[in-house]
Amino acid sequence: MVTLHGEHIYLRALEPEDLEFIYAIENDESIWELSATVAPYSRYLIKQYLENAHQDIYEAKQLRLVICNKETLVLGLIDIFDFDVKNKRAGIGILLQHSENRHKGYGKEALNLLCNYCFTHLDLHQLYCNISEENIASIKLFSNQGFQDVGLKKDWNYSNGSFKNEYLYQLINTNVH
C-alpha cells in the first residue's frame, strides 16, 4: 500500500513494530466504549493480528492505518471497516491516542486523506461513522469534513450502567455512480 502523505501527518500500514502501541490502545479502558471492547487483549493476540495485517482490504473487509507526524511519532489510528464492494461503502473510525495531540488538526488531516483514498482508489460511493452523542469532538470533526447526521440510534450502546444514543453520519461521494 502506498503511504498517504498530508501537510503535517501521514498514514501508513501497520508494522510488527506497532505491537506495543496497539497493545496500549486496545487495553486502554478509557476508550473501550468507542470500540465496543469489553475485555483486554494479550500481546500474543495482537501479534497474531499484526501478522495478518497484510491481508488485502478486499479479503479482510477492513484496513487499519497508523497516523504519524512528520517526525514519525505515532499519533493514533484510522480505520476502514465493513468494507462493502457491492454497495460501494465503508465505515470509518479514528482515534488519536493522547489528548495533547487532539485539536491540532491531525484528525482532520487524517480523515481528509482517508476519505480521498476511499473515493479515489477504492471507488466508494459513501462513507459512514457511528458517533456517541456525547462525543462532541468527533461530531465536530466529521461534520466539518462534510459528513451529515442521518439518524439517531436511541439507547444503542450500553456503557457504565446506562444506555447511550449514537448518531449515524454519512458522506456521499456524488462523483461515483
Image (spheres, grey):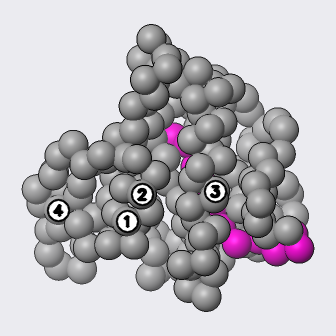
Pointer 3 with pointer 4, Cβ within 8 A: no
* 12 in magenta: no
Q: Which residues are magenta?
A: 71-81
- Left or right: residue 92 versus residue 160 is right
Which amino acid is tagged 3?
Answer: Ala
Note whether 114 is above or below 106 in the view shown: above
Pointer 2 with pointer 4, Cβ within 8 A: no
Q: Secondary structure at mark 4?
A: strand
- Left or right: residue 83 versus residue 38 is right
Q: Which residue is mark 2?
A: 144
Of the two numbered discs 2 and 4 on the same chain, state the one appearing first in sequence.
2
Of the two numbered discs 3 and 4 on the same chain, state the one appearing first in sequence.
3
- Left or right: residue 142 versus residue 102 is left
Determine crowd level at label 2: few under 14, some 14-19, many 20+ residues with C-alpha closer than 10 A.
few
Quadrant holding the N terminus: top right
Which amino acid is tagged 2?
Answer: Asn
Q: CA distance from mark 2 to mark 4?
A: 21 Å
Q: CA distance from mark 3 to mark 2?
A: 13 Å
Q: CA distance from mark 1 to mark 4?
A: 17 Å
Q: Which residue is mark 1?
A: 140
Query: What residue is rendered at 54% in x and 78% in y?
Result: 103
Query: What residue is rendered at 52% in x and 24% in y?
Result: 124
Q: CA distance from mark 3 to mark 4?
A: 26 Å
Q: Please identify, in this view, whether the residue under mark 3 or under mark 4 is nearer the observer.
A: 3
* Res. 165 mark: 4
Residue 45 coordinates in the image, percent (x, y) = 67, 58
